[in-house]
Image (cartoon, rainbow, N blue to C red):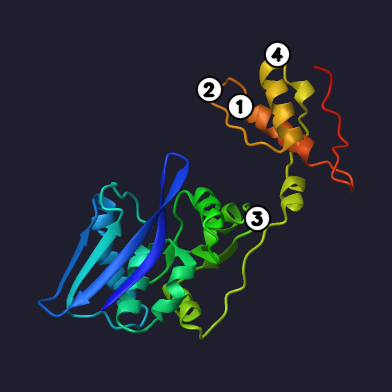
Amino acid sequence: MLARVLSSAVIGIDAYTVEVEVDISKGLPNFSTVGLPEGAVRESKERVKASIKNSGYDFPSDRITVNLAPADVKKEGSAFDLPMAIGILAATGVISADRLSDYLVLGELSLDGLIRPVKGALSVAVMAREMNMKGIFLPMENATEAAAVEGIDIYPVNVLSQVVEALAGSSVIEPFYNDSQELFRAVESELDLSDVLGQENVKRAMEIAAAGGHNLIMIGPPGSGKTMLAKAVANALAAKNDEGLYIKSWGEY
């Protein structure tokens, strides 16, 4: 019995697809993970086994092999717990394997089946949209971050059974969406870029990025003003009129 689940990992700020292949065959009970897994990934088998059992599902007493492809890239973190569990349940017939190719799955499992947050949800959502996936199943705590990417459905889940029932078609999870304007309105700072002394080149770059809707990354030592600048530009972006034009002054530089 073979099942494939699509997941993802992050290198730097870029996400890449990881295909979690699960094969269950006759033999002495054994659970092995291949594909250059590091420590946290190798320990997944204990979390996955306990989570499946404590969620009310049968864990197969056969030989289980999990391959994380591509096999030549080192796999780190605990985000493969959930796709491993889903792959095992798909290989045993609990979930239809036909539905798995349309979604990305990631999340860390606790021993009782709870799903814990992982890193890199934003990058994964960007990649999933570029791949034209139908959606992503990920931890509830990562939903707001991932939903910042428009054009991809985000399905937040709290426990393993939620994902199983949704993929089995016995329940429906409503996609999670952000109100981007509400997020900007939640900014409490009243800082303006005119409050920042010096840093003329940085303020000019931030003005251009904000006006054009471009991404921006700030790198520098503590105390150089990164947080203050970020609060100032977020506060300026919070004020738009109905046409989407900025109505707050950027100040005199």
Image coordinates for residue 161, horizontal then vertical, percent: 44, 77
The residue that disc 2 covers is 220
Residue 193 higher or lower than 114, as above or below: above
Image coordinates for residue 36, horizontal then vertical, percent: 23, 51
- The residues bearing labels 4 and 1 have C-alpha atoms spaced at a distance of 13 Å
The residue that disc 1 covers is 226
Between discs 1 and 3, the one toward the N terminus? 3
Q: Residue at x 14, y 75 (%)?
A: 29
Q: Are marks 2 and 4 in contact (CB under 8 Å)?
A: no
Residue 56 higher or lower than 47, as above or below: below
Between discs 2 and 4, the one toward the N terminus? 4
Decide which of 229, 150 is in the foreground and name it. 150
Dot 4: what SS? Answer: loop
Q: Residues within 10 Å of mark 3 (few under 14, many from 20)?
A: few
Q: Nearer the viewer, mark 1 or mark 3?
A: 3
Q: Which mark is residue 198?
A: 4
In the picture provided, is 172 more to the left or to the right than 23?
right
Dot 1: what SS? Answer: helix
Between discs 1 and 2, the one toward the N terminus? 2
Q: Are marks 1 and 2 in contact (CB under 8 Å)?
A: yes
The residue that disc 3 covers is 150
Image coordinates for residue 95, horizontal then vertical, percent: 40, 81
Q: Residue at x 28, y 47 (%)?
A: 74
Q: What's the residue type where badge 4 is placed? A: Gly
Q: How many marks?
A: 4
Dot 2: what SS? Answer: loop
- The residues bearing labels 4 and 3 have C-alpha atoms spaced at a distance of 35 Å
In the picture provided, is 227 more to the left or to the right than 45?
right
